[in-house]
């Protein structure tokens, strides 16, 4: 069994490699070669959350689980609140094949998913990127988005304005001007909007979003969370990583519960990737990707990390 520690990941997997791995993963899901198992998520008390996301990709020969969660006491210990580890198994024998640090990989695979949605669904002439949220994930989101469109500037909003410096610094790193704006201006000027917050109520409203916008709603990954008004999903053409998660714990949970959209109106992004769905059909329509984060994404980037770590001599082998 190989061990690939968290500290090795940054030198192994970059945004481009994650983009290709997640594209292949969503394509396998669309071909029904790969599927996710039900998610387990438990509250441990004192704000701690722990769970498992797992799945099988028959075509890729990948079986495994990401275990981890949110541990709010960690900041005081000097380590990240979000902690995760991926375990991979041989799908034929069930023998463990690898244990991989999952923290950076989670950020890379989440940003890869939203950038894939931008690549396939945003207007090709998109120039202004709007970001709602300025936490840990937001910088990864911005960098990945900038790989797939020629953005000329970035505008951003965050509930906690003191965090906006992260967006300004990341935009500067990409050579893009950044402006902090209110939500009215963000909706009126952005061609692409990424939402990546821990919000539990709609931040962005339907009337604030102009025609032709593409939204990647990435923060809602649990029952009860919400980033945009449900009416926006009723107006938009809605895409997701997996419909079952989208309607139960993703951004679409609210629009579906309110009867504004039916689950069968939601298309998996993988269908667009394999050419089974046209994706955006007009320059005026609003497209919305509900990125809920599936276990197969974690397994895809972890498998890649193992392959690269073994090739570079950075994986540690142990007998189990
Ligand atoms: P973080 O803790 O670093 O940042 C949280 C962000 O949410 C900040 O911008 C903060 O200002 C904002 N926020 C907090 N409470 C809010 C509220 N009530 N209303 C509006 N904004 C609020 O978190 P992060 O690591 O950047 O992750 C952001 C979100 O993305 C989390 O909710 C996380 O669970 C989710 N996430 C989703 C996926 C996925 O695959 N879809 C993957 C990783 C993380």
Image (cartoon, grey):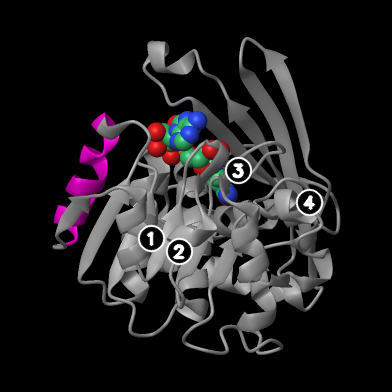
Q: Is residue 169 magenta?
A: yes
In the displayed structure image, the side of residue 6 where residue 320 appears, left or right: right
Instruction: Determine crowd level at label 3: few under 14, some 14-19, many 20+ residues with C-alpha closer than 10 A.
Output: many
Residue occupied by mark 2? 209
Q: CA distance from mark 4 to mark 1?
A: 24 Å
Q: Nearer the viewer, mark 1 or mark 3?
A: 1
Residue occupied by mark 4? 258
Q: Earlier in the sequence, mark 2 or mark 3?
A: 2
Residue occupied by mark 1? 187
Disc marking residue 310? none
Q: Which residues are magenta?
A: 162-174
Front residue (pair 49, 213)? 213
Image coords of residue 73 (percent x, y): 49, 12
Q: CA distance from mark 2 to mark 3?
A: 16 Å
Front residue (pair 262, 246)? 262
Residue occupying the point 52% across, 70% down: 117
Q: Is residue 311 visible?
A: no
Q: Nearer the viewer, mark 3 or mark 4?
A: 4
103 is higher (above) or lower (below) than 268: above
Q: Is residue 222 magenta?
A: no
Q: CA distance from mark 1 to mark 2?
A: 5 Å
Q: Secondary structure at mark 3?
A: strand
Disc marking residue 226? 3
Q: Are marks 3 and 4 in contact (CB under 8 Å)?
A: no
Locate the N terminus and report the quarter of the image it occupies.
top right
């Amino acid at each position: 069994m190989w061990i690939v520690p968290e500290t090795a990941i940054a030198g192994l997997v970059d945004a481009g490699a994650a983009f290709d791995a997640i594209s292949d993963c969503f394509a396998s899901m669309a071909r029904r070669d790969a599927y996710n198992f039900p998610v387990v998520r438990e509250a441990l008390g004192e704000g701690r959350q722990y769970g498992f996301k797992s799945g099988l990709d028959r075509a890729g020969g990948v079986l495994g689980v990401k275990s981890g969660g949110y541990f709010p006491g960690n900041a005081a210990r000097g380590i990240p609140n979000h902690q995760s580890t991926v375990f991979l198994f041989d799908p034929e024998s069930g023998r463990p094949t690898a244990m991989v640090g999952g923290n950076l990989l989670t950020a890379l695979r989440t940003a890869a998913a939203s950038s894939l949605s931008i690549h396939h669904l945003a207007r090709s002439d998109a120039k202004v990127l709007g970001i709602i949220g300025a936490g840990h994930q937001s910088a990864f989101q911005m960098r990945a988005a900038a790989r797939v469109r020629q953005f000329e500037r970035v505008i951003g909003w965050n509930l906690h304005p003191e965090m906006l410096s992260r967006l300004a610094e990341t935009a500067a790193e990409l050579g893009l001007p950044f402006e902090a704006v209110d939500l009215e201006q963000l909706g009126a000027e952005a061609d692409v909007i990424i939402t990546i917050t821990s919000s539990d109520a709609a931040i962005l409203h339907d009337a604030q979003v102009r025609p032709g916008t593409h939204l990647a709603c990435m923060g809602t990954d649990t029952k009860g969370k919400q980033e945009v008004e449900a009416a926006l999903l009723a107006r938009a053409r809605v895409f997701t990583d997996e419909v079952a998660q989208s309607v139960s714990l993703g951004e679409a949970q609210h629009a579906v519960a309110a009867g504004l959209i039916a689950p069968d109106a939601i298309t998996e992004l993988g269908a667009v990737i394999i050419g089974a769905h046209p994706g955006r059909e007009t320059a005026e329509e609003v497209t919305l990707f509900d990125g809920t984060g599936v276990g197969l994404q974690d397994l895809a980037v972890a498998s890649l990390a193992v392959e690269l770590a073994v090739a570079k001599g950075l994986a540690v082998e142990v007998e189990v």
